[in-house]
Amino acid sequence: MLRLDRATLIHRYSKSIMTRLSGSVILALGAVLCGCSYIPHDPSFASLSGTVSYRQRIALVPEAVVLVELVDLSSGEVREDIIAAQRIERPGQVPVKFELKYDENAIVRGHHYAVVASIYQGRRLIFNSPTSVPVLDTGSPHSVEVILDPVSS
């Protein structure tokens, strides 16, 4: 039977505690340092709400999907820059309410913004915005109505 004297036991016990503590201290210090190097960006969010509808007296199928986008039209390219989007699955019947939340810091003074919408049945586009609805310009409302036209097959 191996007997250890008191000094050996204290030395081993304290060494074990110090190893555990030093590992915990290193982990805690690493977490603190990583936390200090990360400065979160706190965007200033705003919202734009409204409805999407169409004039035809046609019920939407249950699997319909409404897609609403806030776009920047200022790029001059065919494809607009999308600032915010909302996908509404199984929207029920029109009018369909939407709320686009966007980062106000992404809005550039002097640019032109609009809301566009479309409705899909599966992968098939069935309704689309004939024109974009201007928003976020001086005097533009923060609540809009987007009227869609049917897409011919």
Image (cartoon, helix red, strand yellow):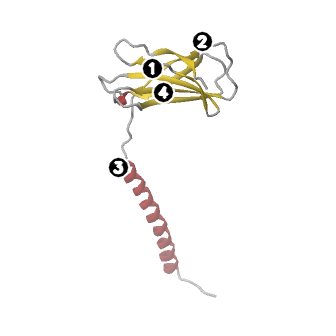
* Amino acid type of the residue that numbered disc 4 sits on in the rendered structure: Glu
Q: Nearer the viewer, mark 4 or mark 2?
A: 2
- Relative to residue 84, is residue 49 depicted above or below? above
User: In the rendered structure, are the residues bearing label 1 and label 3 in contact, judged by CB atoms less than 8 Å apart?
Assistant: no
Write down the residue under mark 1.
132
Q: Residues within 10 Å of mark 4 (few under 14, many from 20)?
A: some
Q: Residues within 10 Å of mark 3 (few under 14, many from 20)?
A: few
Give the Cα distance between marks 4 and 2.
20 Å
Q: Nearer the viewer, mark 4 or mark 1?
A: 1
Query: What is the quadrant of the N terminus in the image?
Result: bottom right
Query: What is the quadrant of the C terminus in the image?
Result: top right
Write down the residue under mark 3.
37
| Left or right: residue 118 compared with residue 28 | right
Question: In the rendered structure, which disc, 2 or 1, sits on the residue that comes first in sequence?
Answer: 2
User: In the rendered structure, are the residues bearing label 4 and label 2 in contact, judged by CB atoms less than 8 Å apart?
Assistant: no
Question: In the rendered structure, which disc, 4 or 1, sits on the residue that comes first in sequence?
Answer: 4
Q: Nearer the viewer, mark 3 or mark 4?
A: 4
Residue closest to the far bottom? 1
Q: Residue at x 51, y 21 (%)?
A: 129
Write down the residue under mark 4.
69
Which labelled disc corresponds to residue 55? 2
Q: Residues within 10 Å of mark 1 (few under 14, many from 20)?
A: some
Give the Cα distance between marks 3 and 4.
34 Å
Question: In the rendered structure, which disc, 4 or 2, sits on the residue that comes first in sequence?
Answer: 2
- Relative to residue 135, is residue 18 depicted above or below? below
Q: Nearer the viewer, mark 1 or mark 3?
A: 1
* Amino acid type of the residue that numbered disc 1 sits on in the rendered structure: Ser
